[in-house]
């Protein structure tokens, strides 16, 4: 490959979609949202072939990307009924990095969750040493990550304790890979200073952080407004937050998240 491969992951609903938008504003980096089979990190030949295919597409003047009903590029994957794959024009001029974004699989996805978790550390090492690439993960305060899980996925509207077990498993796997060359980005830092995050990721990959378009404007997150929009009472949210802090608090602190209720 002539372009550097970059793999971006995250616990679902942690800001990876926003990070794609930000990185795709740079001249040097192109990130594709969840290419088919990109979750199969056990099969390294498969991952390598995906990167090579994407580089070939870019040399032909386009990238495969998810688009909405109106044909415009989207980075989220929900609701899936309104999103399809399309070819988006993109010149290879100035591009040095081709990226894949794939969130950690859902806890309920028995075919991929455990293999992804088990293989993640060696995958990070393989990307750095064998592919001469880079790997990053974006995380978010688990209280809001799991609140978003509950309001997005029907399968996760049940036990908060089970959600915490899933988040702890993912978060522990991420933390265990820090010394292998993994970069960890916090969603909160992205929303307050996107330019600095772009610079940090560019340095991690080893490229220049020059922009080809303005960074997207990020609306300030207002907790109360979010609850009203989702139809959740403050009391119910705070009860869930206490559970999250009790079960996930120690691991969350490793990412710099302090407790609010305990």
Image (spheres, helix red, strand yellow):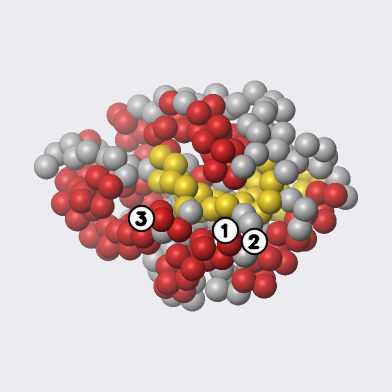
| Residue 228 coordinates in the image, percent (x, y) | 33, 32
The image shows a total of numbered marks equal to: 3
Work out how far the residue at label 2 is from the one at label 3, CA to CA, in angstroms.
22 Å
Q: Are marks 1 and 2 in contact (CB under 8 Å)?
A: yes
Left or right placement of residue 26 versus residue 13 in this view: right
Left or right placement of residue 241 versus residue 56 in this view: left
Q: Nearer the viewer, mark 3 or mark 1?
A: 1
Instruction: Judge the density around disc 3: few (<14), some (14-19), many (≥20) Cα neighbours within 10 Å.
Output: some
The one of 243 and 250 positioned closer to us in this rendering: 250
Q: In the current view of this chain or complex, which residue is farthest to the right?
A: 60
Q: Earlier in the sequence, mark 2 or mark 3?
A: 2
For disc 1, the marked residue is 128
Residue 52 to residue 136: above or below: below
Instruction: Judge the density around disc 2: few (<14), some (14-19), many (≥20) Cα neighbours within 10 Å.
Output: some
Res 176 label: none
Res 175 label: 3
Quarter of the image with the C terminus is top left
| Residue 129 coordinates in the image, percent (x, y) | 58, 62
Q: Earlier in the sequence, mark 3 or mark 1?
A: 1
Q: Nearer the viewer, mark 2 or mark 3?
A: 2
Residue 237 to residue 124: above or below: above
| Residue 193 coordinates in the image, percent (x, y) | 47, 26
């Amino acid at each position: 490959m002539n372009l550097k491969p970059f793999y971006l992951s995250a616990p679902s609903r942690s800001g990876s979609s926003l990070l794609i938008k930000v990185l795709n504003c740079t001249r040097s980096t192109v990130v594709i949202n969840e290419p088919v089979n990109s979750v199969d990190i056990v099969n390294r030949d498969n991952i390598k072939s995906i990167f090579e295919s994407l580089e070939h597409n870019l040399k032909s003047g386009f990238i495969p990307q998810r688009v909405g009903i109106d044909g415009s590029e989207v980075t989220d994957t929900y609701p899936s009924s309104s999103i399809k794959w399309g070819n988006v024009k993109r010149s290879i001029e100035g591009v040095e990095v081709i990226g894949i974004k794939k969130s950690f699989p859902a806890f309920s996805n028995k075919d991929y969750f455990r293999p992804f978790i088990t293989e993640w550390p060696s995958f990070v090492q393989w990307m750095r040493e064998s592919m001469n690439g880079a790997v990053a993960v974006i995380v978010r305060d688990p209280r809001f990550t799991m609140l978003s899980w509950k309001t997005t996925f029907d399968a996760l509207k049940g036990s908060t304790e089970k959600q915490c077990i899933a988040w702890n498993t993912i978060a522990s796997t991420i933390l265990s890979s820090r010394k292998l060359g993994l970069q960890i980005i916090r969603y909160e830092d992205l929303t307050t200073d996107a330019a600095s995050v772009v610079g940090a990721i560019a340095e991690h990959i080893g490229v220049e952080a020059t922009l080809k378009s303005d960074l997207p404007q990020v609306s300030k997150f207002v907790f109360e407004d979010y609850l009203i929009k989702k139809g959740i009472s403050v009391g119910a949210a705070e009860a869930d937050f206490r559970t999250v802090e009790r079960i996930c608090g120690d691991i969350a602190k490793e990412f710099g998240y302090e407790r609010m209720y305990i």
